[in-house]
Amino acid sequence: MADLYTVVSSIILLFIVLDPVGVSPYVASIVARRPEGERERIVRTALASAGAILVAFTLIGVAVLDILGVSMDEFKVAAGLLLLIYATADLFEIKIGYSEPSGDEVAIFPLATPLLAGPGSIATVMYIMGSSGIAVALIAILVNLVLAYPILHASLKLVRLLGRHGSLLVAKFTAFLMVGFAVSIIFDGLRGIVPGVFS
């Protein structure tokens, strides 16, 4: 049975990597174009989906990646590329796909993954599971989802406060930041795949 220190330190570690405070501006920018009644549902769906992804990787993540022959660094590059495409399209208002994504779709991508349950969060829960056990990893996920909800919910109030034009300005700025974040994920993965080249 894990001691209290292990549980608390695991919760703090995942909170730092999950970074709901840092993600909240992205949430605000993404929900800004949505009807007010839909915004709350997007946040709840994003958190539930992120939780499901993290739990799934805690239980079977290592086995799935091994079966597919995919390393964590390769997973980072793939996630970073997807986020880069989304952020660039959002920045220049380029439509991807055949129709405007629904609230549930944006809640899952890019909010649930890779912004919340990204490569860093996934690697962290897999590390906690390997070092402290499945129970500690699951507790850390649950507590962090509870902590993240009021933080992300506050971003909805920010959208209402800024209004349409202010929210659009924030959306463009955070899309630009998201491009940089995506590039950092890609290079982090490349450093692991090709050591010394991207250091």
Image (tube, rainbow, N blue to C red):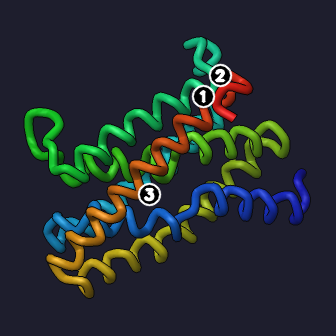
In front of the other: 171 or 107? 171
**Does residue 189 lie above or below 37 as drawn?**
above
In front of the other: 24 or 177? 177
In the rendered structure, which disc, 1 or 3, sits on the residue that comes first in sequence? 3
Question: Tag on residue 126?
Answer: none
Residue 132: x %, y % from top left: 84, 45
Residue 73 lies in quadrant = top right
Residue 187: x %, y % from top left: 57, 36
Q: Is residue 41 visible?
A: no
**Does residue 68 lie above or below 148 as drawn?**
above
Q: Amino acid at mark 2?
A: Ile
- Residue drawn at x 38%, y 62% as measured from the top left: 26
Comparing labels 3 and 2, the label whose residue is closer to the camera: 2
Which residue is situated farthest in the left direction here?
99
Q: Which residue is mark 2?
A: 193
Q: Amino acid at mark 3?
A: Leu
Q: Amino acid at mark 1?
A: Leu
Quadrant where the image shows the C terminus:
top right
Q: Which residue is mark 3?
A: 47
